[in-house]
Amino acid sequence: MPLLPLLLSALAATSLAATLLPRQTSSITVDLTKTYQTMNGFGMSETFQRANQMHALSPALQRYSLDLLFNRTSGAGFSILRNGIGSSPDSSSDHMISIQPKSPGGPSAAPKYVWDGNDNSQVWVSTEAVKTYGVSTVYANAWSAPGYMKTNNNDANGGSLCGVSGATCSSGDWRQAYADYLVQYITYYRELGVEITHVGFLNEPDLTTSYASMRSNGAQAADFIKVLRPTLDKNNMTAVSIACCDAEGWSSQSGMMGSLGSVDAMLGTVTAHSYTSQPGSPINTKHPVWQTENADLQGAWTAAWYSSNGAGEGLLWANKIYDAIVKANCSAYLYWVGVQGGATNSKLVRISDDKKTVTPSKRLWAFANWSRHVRPGAVRVGTSGSPSGAKVSAFKNVDGSVSVQVIQGGTASGTVGVKVGGFTVGKAKAWITDNTRDCDELAATVGSDGSVSASVPGRSMVTFVLEPAS
Ligand SMILES: *[C@@H]1O[C@H](CO)[C@@H](O)[C@H](O)[C@H]1NC(C)=O
Ligand SMILES: *[C@@H]1O[C@H](CO)[C@@H](O)[C@H](O)[C@H]1NC(C)=O
Ligand SMILES: *[C@@H]1O[C@H](CO)[C@@H](O)[C@H](O)[C@H]1NC(C)=O
Ligand SMILES: *[C@@H]1O[C@H](CO)[C@@H](O)[C@H](O)[C@H]1NC(C)=O
């Protein structure tokens, strides 16, 4: 296929158009009466001992890393932390240690929980997130049940939870024991003052891996949810939302929804990853939908905003987040890892090989543009009009402020005016991220008609924040 020549001529046409076009003035109208989903937030994970890597840094770099993730003025201002509930018998390699590494003897034997108060440094990250930075949403997610609860007697390599349909084991039905186990994990965190708000019991149940993994179809997940919901309720955890099922891709999660119908009232949050298919349209459910894991897993580390629209570039991630929220009705968007060492883009922030520096990528700043200004509880609202080639979204925050994101993926540039119907602007600010700027303030002016204008260059993301007049 002669794809390259086609692509080159398309590029040439675009830059020619850009040089010939005058700078354009365009306007966006926000309609606060047209409402869509309520937002829960943005986040990432430090599972599989990534939190240990952060904790091993110098105190100054620990603070810098935490600020990059959770600080609302100097970092991304993430509002959701996804933790891993361990299933492994040990902490070797990057294993997540189980709170019950050895079988207590059977599904009805008295449990033998072991708690080290550390949880591979996830207790530290969680405590900082919640107590220092005010994060109020913690998603604890198990990749698998411990091996002795499963058909393959191993927490890795797939296998299913004993007791769900089609998974009978000589050792018996472990569903209640697994539900008790998850409740115990939540209890340990509660005792430390960290409320786990969401619990998941599966990760990529459509995939078998050499690390912690457990297979499940929708009907098998429903078989467990039936046991987990009453167990949480009996333990003063009625507010803990059951999240399911973190399938590997959007279509795969969509395909599980039919069989989850019987437990719809017990399900709280629908979760899916974006590896095998991207969030392009809403999943059919009335529950909030979260995109809980995505990353450029293989690409060589890049901190760039825009160079060639490569898989790790910031502008591309700004667009991915937009698509998930606006096209697929997501209430949350989480990257895979926050801070980690190594040479790929699987994280947002890189720890250098000598562990002496920590470097944020523009992916982090793409998230910041959303996360800082679209706070938990914000409602997405309607917009009309947009600069040529731009993607526009808008949200009304709980505090009454309105934030509007303009992603200019093309080369068009010009003044953009934002007008919010029925809203009297008090203060207005605008923030820009592009190749050279990271969440820098951009001049914004309030016109006599109450519209707020700023200059939006090509290949940038600009967020307008409008505060109501008091
Ligand atoms: C966030 O960063 C700002 C600016 O560096 C700093 O003043 C503030 O103390 C930090 N906030 C927290 C909660 O650490
Ligand atoms: C129930 O849980 C809440 C936290 O969600 C806690 O504040 C309260 O003390 C608990 N009540 C009992 C009886 O344990
Ligand atoms: C979008 O998600 C909300 C829940 O967050 C749901 O109530 C609504 O029906 C969904 N809309 C569509 C079009 O799926
Ligand atoms: C988006 O991120 C850039 C940094 O890359 C920053 O300058 C800009 O203020 C951010 N926008 C918002 C709304 O946070």
Image (cartoon, helix red, strand yellow):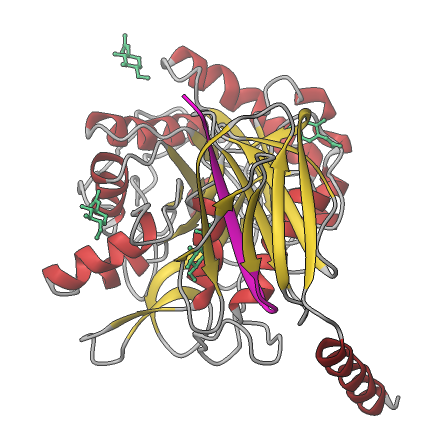
Q: Is residue 37 left or right of residue 302?
A: right
Give above or below for 177 relative to 306: above
Q: Residue at x 64, y 66 (%)?
A: 413
Is residue 331 found inside the magenta-colored segment of the image? no
Give above or below for 306 relative to 87: below
Between 363 and 103, the one lying in front of the other is 363
Residue 172 position, x and y percent, is 51, 31
Residue 407 in sight here: yes
Q: Residue at x 57, y 48 (%)?
A: 405
Q: Quadrant of the C terminus?
A: top left
Q: Using the rendered view, name the quadrant where residue 338 is placed.
A: bottom left
Residue extending farthest to the left is 59
Q: Is residue 391 left or right of residue 367?
A: right
What residue span does the magenta drawing correspond to?
A: 456-470
Residue 445 position, x and y percent, is 49, 47
Q: Residue at x 17, y 65 (%)?
A: 57
Chief secondary structure of the magenta span?
strand
Give above or below for 231 relative to 202: above
Q: Is residue 216 left or right of residue 60?
A: right
Q: Quadrant of the N terminus?
A: bottom right
Between 157 and 120, the one lying in front of the other is 120
Residue 55 in sight here: no
Give above or below for 5 relative to 43: below
Q: Residue at x 71, y 29 (%)?
A: 285
Residue 433 position, x and y percent, is 47, 62
Q: Is residue 177 left or right of residue 135?
A: right
Between 390 and 46, the one lying in front of the other is 390
Residue 309 position, x and y percent, is 62, 75
